[in-house]
Image (tube, helix red, strand yellow):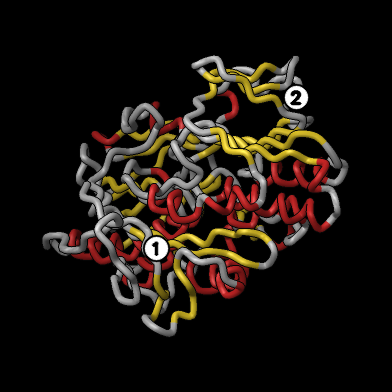
Amino acid sequence: MKKLLVLGAGTAGTMIVNRLRRRLDARQWDITVVDHDDVHPYQPGFLFLPFGTYSPDQITRSRHATLPDGVGFVIGDVDRIDPPSNTVALLDGRTLGYDYLVIASGTTPRPDQTPGMLEAEWRRSIFDFYTFEGAKALAKALQTFDHGRLVVHITDMPIKCPVAPLEFTFLADAWLRERGLRDRVEIVYVTPLPGAFTKPVCSSALGYMLDERKIALETDFMVERIDVENKALISYDEREVPFDLLVTIPLNMGADFVARSGLGDELNYVPVDKHTLQSKAYPNIFAVGDACDIPASKAGSVAHFSVEIFTGNFLQLIAGKPMTGSFDGHANCFIESGNGKGLLIDFNYDTEPLPGKYPLPLVGPLGLLKETRANHLGKLAFRWIYWNVLLPGRSMPVPTHMSMLGKTTNKTTTTTQ
């Protein structure tokens, strides 16, 4: 019997085992997935926890409940992968074999990588919202924050859900206005990028959104350390950004076991072919979702679209055929902008976000690069779609590859990589 081993029961790993269990003969294929616990979080929900939009129990489920019958689920921490022997060692001493391996271990915030971040002010005046515990702690802190300097800070790229820090900033602005506190709070957005948005076209087209909300912008800021005593971010070029409440996105890194196995780059992401997700070092290993080094957003939509390509390719590979599917880096991201509105962007490896309608030309119903109520409702509706359509591996009525239908083009929106 052939063995498929998947490391990680998050978004990408869960979609893969749900899709492949239906396509692979259970008499010929054993599928096992490994993760360190039995809690599957809806990570986009972390953004809403601090503002009370969701409660903690609305954004977590048992991993068992999201996995199909006929798939083995092992709870344990991975120590290392040994590609020559096709085995994975767990920290508790167990060893799992495989014929094909999928690394879907995601990316994790690492506050320990920035001097001062994890010291006395951690979860007192310094918070994150990219973790379940961090988002809950921040929700509590916001209840008593009624004046001062709120700084939203990105340590470095890449990060999962690159637009989330900006979404948090917009939601915080709206939340403070609703409570009559906005005039008592200065908001500063600090980024290592040259603009607020990760995509240059977005920064050019949507930069006004910070100005009209009176949000100060500090760009090209590479943090060297946090001065805990004086509550200030210190950059390598010696700029200082003081804060009363710091909401930071720490450096994101892949799993430590990837480094221990000699399979990762300097941030523990697995180098893969960006079109097939196949390891550049071992043909029977793939890395998907946030665990790989493809030059695309570390976002749920990228996991979704790339897993669709991976599934077809994997079935071709095991049948002895060439893999013909090619992932184009397709991503689309809702951007909450506060006040019951949101934006939507759609792009891929080669094409920057464009204005227009999505997913259908003319009728949409979602507008691209435009604040609308429909985009906000689409963001909220996605939680149901995530649990009931996306994770179970069901088809979505949107194109896997980026479509130009309904989009308005100009000479500045297309680049070649």
User: Circle 1 sits on which residue?
Assistant: 346
Q: Amino acid at mark 2?
A: Glu
Residue pointed to by mark 2: 121
Q: Is residue 256 visible?
A: yes
Q: Does residue 366 appear left or right of residue 144 in this picture?
A: left
* Residue projecting furthest to the bottom: 363
* Callout count: 2
Question: In the displayed structure, would residue 49 be above or below residue 217?
Answer: below
The front one of 287 and 28 is 287
Identify which residue, 349 or 149, lies in the foreground. 149
Element under disc 2: loop
* Disc 1 secondary structure class: strand
State whether residue 55 is above or below residue 187. Answer: below
Q: Position of residue 315 (x, y in %)?
A: 23, 65
Q: Give the class, few, some or many, for how many residues have Cα within 10 Å of label 2's Cα (few <14, many ≥20).
A: some
Q: Earlier in the sequence, mark 2 or mark 1?
A: 2
**Could one spot residue 395 in this view of the protein?**
no
Residue 350 x/y as whole percent: 26, 54
The image quadrant of residue 307 is: bottom left
Q: Where does residue 22 sit, x and y in percent of width and height?
A: 37, 73
Toward which corner of the image does residue 193 lie, by quadrant?
A: top left
Q: Residue at x 30, y 57 (%)?
A: 413
Residue occupying image coordinates x 58% and y 48% = 166
Q: Is residue 85 left or right of residue 335?
A: left
